Amino acid sequence: MSDYDYDLFVIGGGSGGVRAARIAATHGARVGIAEEYRYGGTCVIRGCVPKKLFVYASKFSEEFEDAEGFGWTVGERNFSWEKLVSAKDQEIARLEGVYRRNLDRTGVEMHDSRAVVVDEHTVRLLSTGQTISARYILIAVGASPNVDTSLPGVEHVITSNEAFHLSELPDSIVVAGGGYIAVEFAGIFNGLGVDTTLIYRGEEILRGFDMDLRKAVHEEMVKKGIKVVCGDVFSSIEKRDDGQLVGHTKGGKALHAGQIMFAIGRNPHTADLGLEAAGVEMDGIGAIKVDSQSRTNIPSIFAVGDVTNRANLTPVAIREGHAFADTVFGNKPWEVDHSLIATAVFSQPEVGTVGLTQEQALAKTGNLDIYKSSFRPMKHTLSGRDEKMLMKLIVDADTGKVLGVHVLGPDAGELAQVLGITLQMGATKADFDRTIAVHPTAAEELVTMREPTERIRA
């Protein structure tokens, strides 16, 4: 009989932790898991899933307008924020139930409590004070929204966590940040009729993405009525007697709003988790340092997902959790390849991307062929909407290998998933050229661009 209560104890019931727990259990391990809030983690409970539902809701305002160009007469329109929030809450509750049932079905024992690490083989449940021993401990607690705690008036701002549960829709909002979350929520609020401003400290939004995409998203957001302020940050937040907020910026602006939302990044949720006492090494922002197999410097303690700050995406956390469980408990060792990850930004219009940006590709090779096409989607030839799509291929001119594909436009995220497969297989521009186009689609542009729009040579 084992000297431990469990073979594996997981702290954190998000996507990565749940996947690791379930796979380890199917390999015959005795598994326990602790979650202090709700099973499903950031993505399911207060992230990707409710956000995508809100994106769908916000797009109907344009759909109603576009319908008239196709002969439809659309009558009086009304939107209920309360109904949307209620419907979202019902779906999230359903999904959490699915997560719990899947854990129960595989024999994982759930503990509805915050858990902290005591030492390399022991955790403590704070709700009961119970200590539990485990051969291995997996940390999968994710990350939490970051706010500038030194900012005067910061107590008046909300984050994405609170945005999902607002009692009423504000008439105006300022979103601080320029990444995924900020850009997506700016589109959501704007689509729901909220006067929306985005403020970002950098020179252009969506840092880390291809510059052509970044500029195109910015341009389309402005067309839709979002005010975008780059190169500026808040210096203080003032709450007036009427409840309205005024965000004063270092650039001398006074941005008035019913709500101010911070989406300036997320920090690993490792505070007060007992990791320092257990000797687990972390970096300057609290991310747990791990090797390629997600093992920390303590041989019995592992970590997956956003808490490691490697590639902070839900599917990546799931893969890391699965690889950990197969390697440690299934006698099937494998590692996650973080070098080629397809991703989507549910901005409006949507972004789908996989592979290297032009800037990253130039750092690897001086010889590139760039294929780029910008055009109006077929739908808008009748709707009359002034919106452009962008398709871009980045090709190694010496080998013909496609290094990156970047798409802006309707359903770009769906395209990115399929394009991820082609790049994972090492597709060349010749492979794209040999592929017969599907007509009439926007995606056919990816296989019909014959001549480079730009040739870069060392």
Image (tube, rainbow, N blue to C red):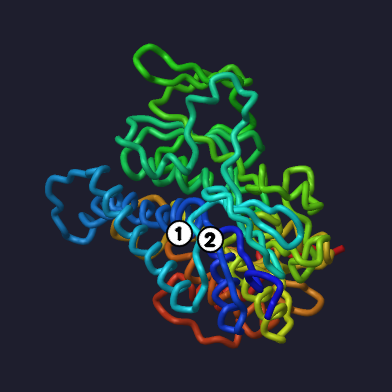
Q: Point out the tag, 1 or 2, that comes first from the N-terminus.
A: 2
Image height of 15 relative to 156, above or below: below
Image height of 264 relative to 84, above or below: above
* Quarter residue 68 falls in: bottom left
State the residue lying farthest toward the right.
458
The secondary structure type at the circle numbered 2 is: loop
Q: Which mark is residue 128?
A: none
Picture coordinates of residue 311 (x, y %)? 67, 60
Report the residue at 43% width, 67% height from top: 100
Picture coordinates of residue 237 (x, y %)? 52, 20
The secondary structure type at the circle numbered 1 is: helix
| Local crowd size for mark 2, using a 10 Å CA cut-off: few (<14), some (14–19), many (≥20) | many
What amino acid type is highlighted by mark number 1?
Val
Q: Is residue 140 left or right of residue 82?
A: right
Quarter of the rendering occupied by the N terminus: bottom right
Report the residue at 48% width, 22% height from top: 255
Picture coordinates of residue 307 (x, y %)? 66, 54
| Local crowd size for mark 1, using a 10 Å CA cut-off: few (<14), some (14–19), many (≥20) | many
From the viewer's perspective, is the residue at label 1 or at label 2 nearer? 2
Cα–Cα gap, marks 1 and 2: 8 Å
Q: Is residue 44 left or right of residue 316?
A: left
What amino acid type is highlighted by mark number 2?
Gly
Q: Which mark is residue 14?
A: 2
Residue located beneath label 1 in the image: 44
Quarter of the rendering occupied by the C terminus: bottom right
- The reply to whether discs 1 and 2 touch (Cβ–Cβ < 8 Å) is yes
Residue 54 visible in rendering: yes
Report the residue at 29% width, 57% height from top: 90
Picture coordinates of residue 242 (x, y %)? 34, 15
In-front residue for pair 174/44? 44
